[in-house]
Amino acid sequence: MDSRKFRITWKTILLPSLGLAAFFIYLYIFGVDIATIFETAKSIDFSIYFLAVVAVIFETFLFAISWRSLVTFLSVKLSVMQSFLYVWYGIYMDIIIPAESISGEISRIYLVTREQSEASGKIVASLVAHRLMGMGINIGSLLVGMIVLLMGKQLSGIVLNLTLFLVVITTAFLVLLILLSVKEKWTLKIIRSVIGFVERISRGKWRLSKVRAEVIKAASIFHNSMKEYGHAPKTLLTSLCFYVLSWLLSLTVTYLVFLSLGYPIHWSIIVVTCSIVVAVKSIPLGVPFEAGLPEITMSALFMVLLTDIPLDMRVAICGTATILVRILTVWFRFFIGFVIQQWLGIKGMTTPGVNVEQLKPETKKI
């Protein structure tokens, strides 16, 4: 076994490291005393923070179960353990590769289809249906959190406008995705246009007739699978319930972090803040959102919304809480995902017909 194939390189952790550096630069520019943040972190209750660690693991497990219920409904074999491992692998890919909104999903498609080559259309359908659920949950969370904060007169004009903007944008993407899921002719037209464009710019060097046939076949299976979901409300409800539980646990992580610092905050603030972060991350613009922007967004929102904490204390508390949350949601997930990626790679080396190099992320593109 070639040990060189399984190690963390500087390229692997480039984006997460840049994100942390960007966040500290943000704190410095706005005159935040970083030493005070570290001093605040010393007061953390580690027993409560450990519960946040457990919540991250169970959140991921419930997310995997939610996705698996959609996959197995389409007669694709996927065990609970496989779904759990593949989701962790996808999270790892999301962190190290720009375009977080799709990179993890592409990795899950590959991991399933490398063993079940004819299942690509069905896996895409399961991921699209799952994404639709997530977008719907996030829209609902934004609206509920916004209403609660408005009733308590805690929502400023900037955050209100940002929330409404993200609701509109996310809803627009949701409607577009639904239309592409039900309008097979639209999808086929887009596929033919994209492949035709690639053939034209290659000046005839690439003949993609075989690729076109395979993609059109997968698209047909995808649309048939989406129709099957339309006649399976019980399956959709089961998946949705697990997804909601996973989402609630993700909110609990942030709550427990603040609680570990001795500052429990209102759930509506957590709902709005986390929903805004997720809404921006879910827009497929190819932005490496793990590179500083979430930390800055989260910290700024907490600063604006936590008006019941004195300003001199608020800066340190919000900065510390943001760092502690991101340690769990980025670095903890990164290292677990890395271990699983390595394990799946080793397993791939011992599985006939599997090229282990395909399991490794193309970090050179970062």
Image (cartoon, rainbow, N blue to C red):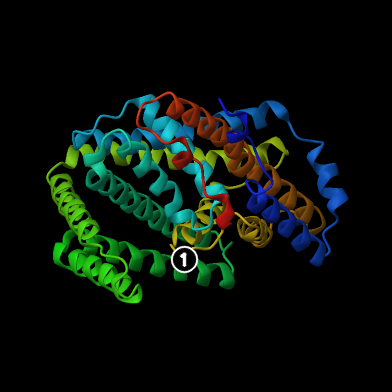
Looking at the picture, does residue 49 appear above or below residue 138? above
Residue at left 22%, top 58%? 181
Amino acid on which disc 1 is placed: Leu
| Observer-nearest of 33 and 8 | 8
User: Which quadrant would residue 142 be assigned to in this image?
Assistant: bottom left
Residue 31 lies, in percent from the top left, at 84, 64
Residue 248 seen in this snapshot? no
Residue at left 18%, top 50%? 226
Residue 190 lies, in percent from the top left, at 24, 69
| Observer-nearest of 278 and 353 | 353
Residue 306 lies, in percent from the top left, at 66, 56
172 with respect to 272 (left or right): left
237 with respect to 8 (left or right): left
| Observer-nearest of 3 and 334 | 3
Number of numbered labels in the structure image? 1
Q: Residue reaching furthest front? A: 205
Residue at left 64%, top 44%? 325
Q: Residues within 10 Å of mark 1 (few under 14, many from 20)?
A: some
Residue at left 57%, top 49%? 96
User: Where is the C terminus found, in terms of image quarters?
Assistant: bottom right
Residue 110 lies, in percent from the top left, at 36, 42
| Observer-nearest of 294 and 349 | 349
252 with respect to 129 (left or right): right
Looking at the picture, does residue 195 appear above or below residue 263? below
Tag 1 residue:
285
